[in-house]
Image: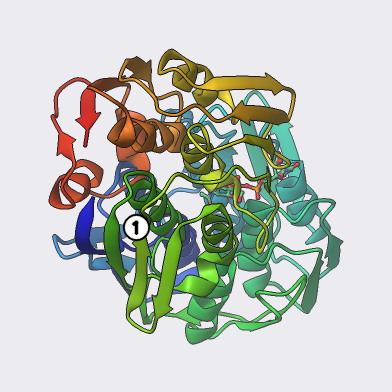
Amino acid sequence: MSGDFTASGSKNGALAIIAASLLVEGEVVLRRVPHIKDIFTMLDILRYLGVRAELSEDGTLQIDASNIVRNEAPAEMVKKMRASFSVLGPLLARTGRARVAVPGGCDIGARPIDLHLKGIHALGALVRNDYGHVEAKASRLRGARIYLDFPSAGATQQIMMAACLSEGTTVIEQAACEPEITDLAWFLRKCGARIEGAGTGTIQVQGVRRLTGVEHEIIPDRVEVGTFALAAANTRGDIFIRNAVPEHCSAVLQKMREIGATVDEDAAGLRVTANRRFIATDIVTMPFPGFPTDLQQPMGAVLTTADGTSIITEKVYEHRFRYLNELKRMGADVYTENRVAVIRGVPYLQGAQVTATDLRAGAALAIAALAAEGVTEISDVEHIQRGYENFEDKLRALGASVLSGEALPCSQ
Ligand code: UD1
């Protein structure tokens, strides 16, 4: 692969900020919103609630949540994507009541909502969780000190958003530090929220009466950047990713250098080159700034042909190894047990028929396919399209041979 492209706006960052727009009276204008299915799902939910939301071709999204007419998000929408559960806190804070179906999304392990509910309850809401729905009520939320047993990105965002319109001060301890959380806080502050400490383990929110509309640009998608960086490295290519923010991808870039890729950072973006067989390494996924679980699968695909044995320990989601069974069809030598995978590097993989079991698994299979001998046919590619904007077009523009259809045959 060779050439350059501009990173899309962050899927996870945009989803959180779109949900947060429910808190705002007046028009919010978001730039660089990616055209992907998960965003469309979130916009459908907002429209159902009565919000005006228009996404233009160039990624500008206008949202006006001045008139919310419903406070229930139905199961058929929420089940498509876990992130839609994040409307609970903003809807509750804004209207005094929210009823949201328990979420769906990629099947990558138990994805509980206990920390979300613990936070909302601590803010003074009456919370009921039955018949597949969560219902929360509070005439006005009040600030509280909340300790998260795990630094969950979703729970941190949920509590931070709800606390913005509460009475008094909220302190979130062991908060997640992901760049998407820092950017959400930055957006909310521009709208008038009083938030300190986002990006650290302790976030403090001083409630205000109302938030008003602003313009905001979504940060570049660090998972897309990491995925394409790994794809380029796996094909011994040379690409430049405009807009990439290296500090958002530090762990993966460091690991790429460790295995033998060259990564040059500058103010305009990232250049990735590679010209030799990689060396095996060990990976442990952790909350940010640790190695992101979302890039564990793309990295695992690269390690299948590295020289030596790599060990991956998945500490965030227990079912994120299913893609390795698919890579075995392509000749990978892999053993998994619970949260640990042992990958013995083979010289090369062979094209095969494989299935994308979830979003990042699909990306991992495409990365493997690009460097494999012969043609790989990936089915269930709608998982990839949920989260990567113009994935196939971007690969093609960088020189990959990608044929579209029901499945996605890939070769270099
Ligand atoms: C977000 C990202 C996802 C990423 C994940 C971890 C979005 C839309 N998705 O998901 O791409 O893989 O962060 O970086 O932003 N947990 C609980 N109780 C809860 C909530 C979470 O125990 O109430 C646990 C989960 O089981 C998991 C861990 O916390 O083991 C991390 O989950 P979390 O950070 O909440 O992930 P999401 O916000 O769902």
Residue at the spot of label 1: 51
Lateral position of residue 185 relative to residue 197, left or right: left
Q: SS of the residue at dot 1? A: loop
Quadrant hosting residue 410: top left
Q: Give amino acid for label 1.
A: Val
Q: Position of residue 137 (x, y in %)?
A: 69, 51
Q: Position of residue 57 (x, y in %)?
A: 13, 60
Quadrant hosting residue 272: bottom left
Image vertical order of residue 317 relative to residue 396, above or below: above
Observer-nearest of 110 and 379:
379
Check disc 1: other Cα within 10 Å, few if <14, some if 14-19, many if 20+.
many
Residue drawn at 46 percent across, 22 percent down: 327
Residue 270 seen: yes
Disc 1 C-beta below 8 A from ligand 1: no
Q: Position of residue 6 (x, y in %)?
A: 25, 66
Residue drawn at 70 percent across, 66 percent down: 140
Question: Which quadrant would the C terminus be assigned to in this image?
Answer: top left
Lateral position of residue 27 relative to residue 245, left or right: left
Quadrant hosting residue 200: bottom right
